[in-house]
Image (tube, rainbow, N blue to C red):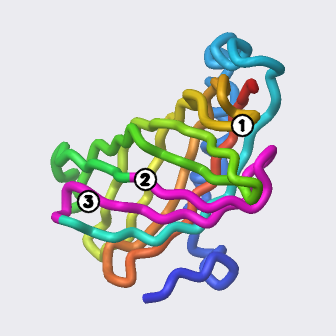
């Protein structure tokens, strides 16, 4: 199954879009942290992902994104998945985290972040996930960047393992 955001837009869980409203309200507590690095600004991203599985625990993920304040961006990170259990519907529940997210803008400036969240893998291989991303510096104009964004996404766990996520929050730099 090849992931095509336009072709599969109707299959995105409606709760992903609805969750942004609640997450944006929850971001109020993150606003104070976002002011440390400079001027606070709204942040948002839309990223297509390609997942490379090493051992079903560690994943390398390549990104192609449109990020507010960075423009068209590439990126990469290593994600670790921890087994949390199986729910009554047979979905596998995972804790996910990464400490090495790097977004690279067209001019070479990098924005660094980490995230922690959860993922659900359906018996059919569909993955939905959500996380809180925390920005922690970078290079160029993002050297002192700080802030947070809530992200939600979907992917497939059946090769080719591709997906999409979007985020919203605040950033200072």
Foreground tag (3 vs 2): 2
Q: Secondary structure at mark 2?
A: strand
Query: CA gap, disc 1 to disc 3?
Result: 42 Å
From the viewer's side, name the closer residue of 149 and 60.
60
Residue 65 falls in image quadrant: bottom right
Of the residues tagged 2 and 1, which is closer to the observer?
Answer: 1
Magenta-drawn segment: 55-77
Q: Position of residue 96 (x, y in %)?
A: 33, 45
**First in sequence: mark 1 vs mark 3:** 3
Between disc 3 and disc 2, whose residue precedes? 2
Q: Is residue 18 above or below residue 134?
A: below
- Which disc number belongs to residue 77? 2
Q: Do tag 1 and tag 3 residues touch (Cβ < 8 Å)? A: no
How many numbered circles does the render carry?
Answer: 3
| Residue at the image position 74 percent from the left and 59 percent from the top | 106
Badge number at residue 140: 1
Question: What residue appears at the point 34 percent right and 55 percent down from the top-left corner?
Answer: 120
The residue to which callout 3 is attached is 91
- Residue 10 x, y percent position in the rendering: 64, 75
Q: CA distance from mark 2 to mark 1?
A: 20 Å
């Amino acid at each position: 199954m090849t992931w095509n955001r336009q072709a599969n837009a109707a299959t995105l869980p409606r709760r992903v879009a609805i969750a942004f409203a609640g997450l944006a309200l929850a971001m109020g507590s993150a606003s104070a942290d976002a002011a440390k690095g400079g001027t606070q600004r709204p942040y948002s991203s839309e990223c297509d992902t390609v997942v490379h599985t090493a051992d079903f625990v560690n994943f390398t993920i390549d990104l192609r994104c449109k990020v507010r304040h960075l423009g068209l961006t590439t990126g990469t990170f290593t994600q670790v998945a921890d087994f949390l259990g199986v729910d009554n519907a047979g979905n596998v529940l995972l804790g996910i985290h990464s400490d090495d997210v790097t977004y690279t803008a067209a001019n070479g400036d990098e924005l660094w972040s980490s995230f922690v969240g959860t993922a659900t893998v359906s018996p059919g291989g569909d993955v939905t996930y959500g996380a809180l991303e925390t920005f922690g510096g970078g290079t160029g104009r993002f050297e002192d960047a700080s802030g947070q964004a809530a992200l939600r996404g979907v992917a497939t766990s059946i090769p080719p393992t591709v997906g999409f996520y979007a985020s919203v929050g605040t950033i200072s730099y």
